[in-house]
């Protein structure tokens, strides 16, 4: 019976990720309830369905269904258990039932590989806890946890091989803390150099998201986790999908999509539009509505604004008017405009339900 106690204690680290997931389920249910609440306001559900031809709850199940978590959690549990047995054996603690032949094979594993395994577990757990706190612990993120364990064991000895012997073990521990994409890129670079392969291919499009207001490095990383890594992707993104896969608020997501739509038309000159009160596509399209209105005053103001934009940006008036007309017919622009209105309706409903917040008193 005492043998089982040893094994239970030894395998306790493998239970940490399943426990993190169980605590995260409450956050997932809160996200689901938020989406359902948003879709009940006005005609938001009809607008969303006409744009993306699916129900938000179906999207939630496709992204966060319980069965999607079974595979990464199972693989992570098994690899963590194997890693724990390996580390204990290297430390001289051989669990009951582990044969001498297995212990001898474990003894042959480089110390840097063991350090990489430990680092992979620690940094993988840290990443899971951080994502759970930020409400974006997706099944794919958990897949990267066990993948990080493998990378720590396999790449750590390669990465630290050029260091002094006394620095290799501690450095191997921190290798797994690096982003997985950077580690893979490093492995590709080393492989191509050693094999004499000349990598060819077209240069990728330079990053564009940093041109939008509010897109800090952390927000850009969060959007990348949702499959959005360019202004074009963001402009045509499903806002519910972004809401479910990031920790960004509904209004922030709509605002970023709104900015991205305008950026796709005017590029980095978007900053020249902002002093005129135009931050995104909705405001730009509203200029077209004023030009087409029957109100003479509104038409004159809109026409003067177009002239000012032409002078400030160097874009001729005809091109600006054509961009305005195109944007007024863009279905994604209409979607953002309608959903933006529903966001404020939700706030008003919450104020009615919970009561308005009292104003803060000042001494």
Image: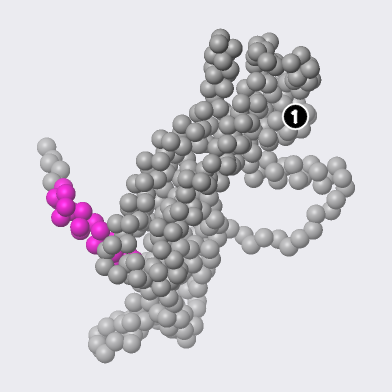
Residue at the spot x=69%, y=23% of the render?
114
Image coords of residue 135 (percent x, y): 42, 44
Q: Going 36% across and 71% down the picture, which residue do you hit?
A: 47
> Where is the N terminus found, in terms of image quarters?
top right
Label 1: which residue? Answer: 157
Viewed as shown, does residue 263 lie left or right of 193? left
Q: Is residue 205 left or right of residue 216?
A: right
Magenta residue check for 4: no
The relative height of residue 178 versus residue 292 in the rendered view (above or below) is above
Judge from the rendering whether residue 8 lies leftward or rightward of residue 280; answer left or right.
Answer: right
Above or below for 155 versus 97: below
The C terminus sits in image quarter? top left
Please name the colour scheme applied to the rendered image. one colour
Residue 177 seen in the current view: no
> Do we see residue 109 in this rendering?
yes
Magenta residues (range): 339-357
Q: Is residue 27 above or below residue 238?
A: above
Residue farthest to the right, as pictured: 196
Q: Residue 337: x and y, percent?
A: 34, 70
Residue 122: name its quadrant. top right
């Amino acid at each position: 019976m005492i043998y089982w106690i040893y094994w239970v204690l030894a395998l306790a680290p493998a239970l940490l990720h399943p426990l993190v997931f169980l605590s995260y389920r409450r956050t997932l249910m809160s996200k689901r309830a938020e989406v359902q609440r948003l879709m009940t306001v006005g005609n938001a559900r009809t607008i969303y369905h006409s744009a993306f031809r699916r129900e938000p709850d179906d999207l939630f199940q496709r992204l966060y269904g319980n069965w999607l978590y079974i595979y990464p959690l199972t693989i992570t549990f098994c690899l963590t258990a194997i890693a724990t047995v390996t580390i204990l054996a290297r430390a001289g603690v051989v669990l009951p039932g582990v044969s001498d032949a297995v212990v001898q094979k474990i003894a042959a594993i480089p110390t840097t590989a063991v350090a990489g395994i430990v680092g992979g577990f620690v940094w993988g757990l840290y990443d899971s806890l951080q994502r759970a706190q930020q409400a974006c612990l997706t099944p794919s993120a958990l897949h990267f946890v066990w993948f990080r364990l493998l990378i720590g064991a396999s790449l750590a000895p390669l990465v630290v091989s050029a260091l002094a012997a006394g620095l290799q073990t501690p450095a191997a521990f921190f290798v797994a803390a690096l982003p997985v994409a950077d580690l893979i890129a490093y492995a590709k670079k080393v492989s191509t150099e050693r094999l004499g392969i000349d990598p060819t291919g077209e240069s990728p499009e330079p990053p564009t998201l940093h041109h939008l207001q509010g897109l800090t490095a952390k927000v850009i990383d969060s959007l990348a986790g949702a499959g959005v890594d360019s202004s074009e992707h963001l402009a045509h993104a499903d806002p519910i999908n972004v809401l479910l896969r990031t920790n960004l608020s509904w209004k922030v997501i709509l605002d970023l999509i709104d900015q991205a739509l305008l950026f796709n038309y005017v590029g980095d000159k978007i900053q020249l539009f902002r002093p005129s009160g135009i931050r995104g596509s909705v405001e730009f399209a509203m200029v077209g509505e004023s030009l087409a209105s029957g109100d003479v005053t509104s038409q004159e103001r809109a026409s003067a604004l177009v002239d000012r934009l032409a002078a400030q940006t160097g874009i001729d008036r005809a091109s600006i008017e054509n961009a305005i007309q195109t944007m007024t017919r863009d279905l994604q622009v209409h979607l953002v405009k309608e959903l933006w209105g529903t966001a404020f309706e939700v706030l008003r409903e919450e104020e009615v339900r919970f009561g308005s917040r009292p104003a803060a008193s000042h001494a």
